[in-house]
Image (cartoon, helix red, strand yellow):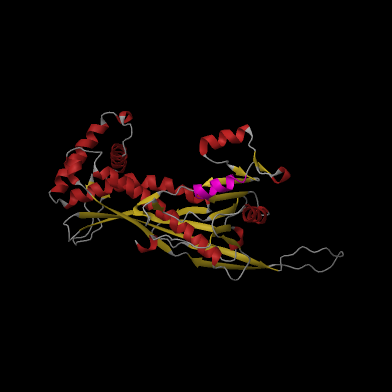
Amino acid sequence: MFDKGGMNNNAQRKEVRVKNVDKIKRYAEINMALLTGQDTTAYGKEVDEVVKFMSQLGARAAQNDETAKAEINTIVKIGIEPLLVKQMQVYQLFGNYRSIGMDETPVVHTWTYESLNADIQAKGSDVSFADRKEVSYAIPTRIISAGMRYNYRDFESKNFVGTNAQEIEQIQTTMHNKGVAYVIDTIVSALKNNTTGVKFYGEYNDEPTQTATDDMIKKIRRMGKVSVLGDYDKIATISGFNGYQNPNSTTLPFYTPSQVDEIAKQGYNGDYKGSSLVVLPNAYNFTKPLADKTAFETYYNPDHIFFVPQNGQSPINIIRRGGLTTMTGNDVSTGSILTRFDMEIGADVVKGREFEIGCLTKSCLLYTSDAADD
């Protein structure tokens, strides 16, 4: 079913060329269903085939069989990749998301116009014609990585709820959230550091104010209906601006029945003054507790709020280059066999079009994405 791949050194590309693509994809799907605790009754007798197959591979891998290790790597990689790709659809909330081949270069093509005007004038007068200037440039990419220690004995003993299942779930969470963090940091940096053109960027001290939020929505609304994107905490804060009246200088809460029902179900209203409120998933990073141990850091800074027009072509480009790759090597200090998963992505805000995205963020940022350092 497999051809052996990789190189004979300590850190190796541990993947194999698949001969029977459909069959191994099916095995990978069932293996992932077992590892994630899904209902496998629909797969019938195939489940027993996969359990037996993975048990045999686990036994061989535990005896340091390099081919078996490579086969396990490939099956896990094929199972994880579609889940990661599905999670990455969240990038479409920001702008244009697409995938390209590993042999392609991520490039942005854009243009600017000069003297593009319509004139009111007498019949027969001269007309001004616009000059179009095309620009192309490459987008830098980053490698989003995560690693795990396979427990081959779990596979051998047919234990699909052991440490392998936990680490694979953590790989999915870590890689997805670090990818989102990288994209967000790229967008904020492009907006904040835009010194040559108009920019809709502002900072607040403790919490975003209703005045600053309303002002940003008004500016972006001229380009289309606005989506307001951010961490749950900030979206809930903006939602809280809804439904309050101030008769006779006394603040009285007032909600319609539909608002009450919506808040009860999801914790916030989905709309604010004609704009859609969208929560960006922002999980805890359980490897980074806060200094006071009251919680954990989140994967991206929760203080960023984005204002994105829903109409037109977004200036944000996000590209996934190639697919998920793996590499395996030995940890000299512990003797463990480590496997690394890599995915390459790039993000860019088209130069000269930064004004098409609005951003409010806290003036004192606590941390930024560490994706570039992994």
Q: Which residue occupies 52% across, 35% down?
A: 265
The residue lying toward the viewer, choosing from 300 and 240, is 240
Q: Position of residue 168 (x, y in %)?
A: 30, 46
Q: Which residue occupies 14% across, 46% down?
A: 60
Q: Position of residue 136 (x, y in %)?
A: 53, 67
The residue lying toward the viewer, choosing from 150 and 363, is 363
Please give the range of residues in magenta: 230-241
The residue lying toward the viewer, choosing from 200 and 152, is 200
Q: Position of residue 28 (x, y in %)?
A: 29, 41
Q: Position of residue 354 (x, y in %)?
A: 58, 62
Quadrant of the rendered image containing residue 31: top left
Q: Is residue 48 visible?
A: yes
Quadrant of the rendered image containing residue 222: bottom right
Q: Is residue 57 magenta?
A: no
- Quadrant in the picture for the C terminus: bottom left
Position of 237 with respect to 162 (left or right) is right
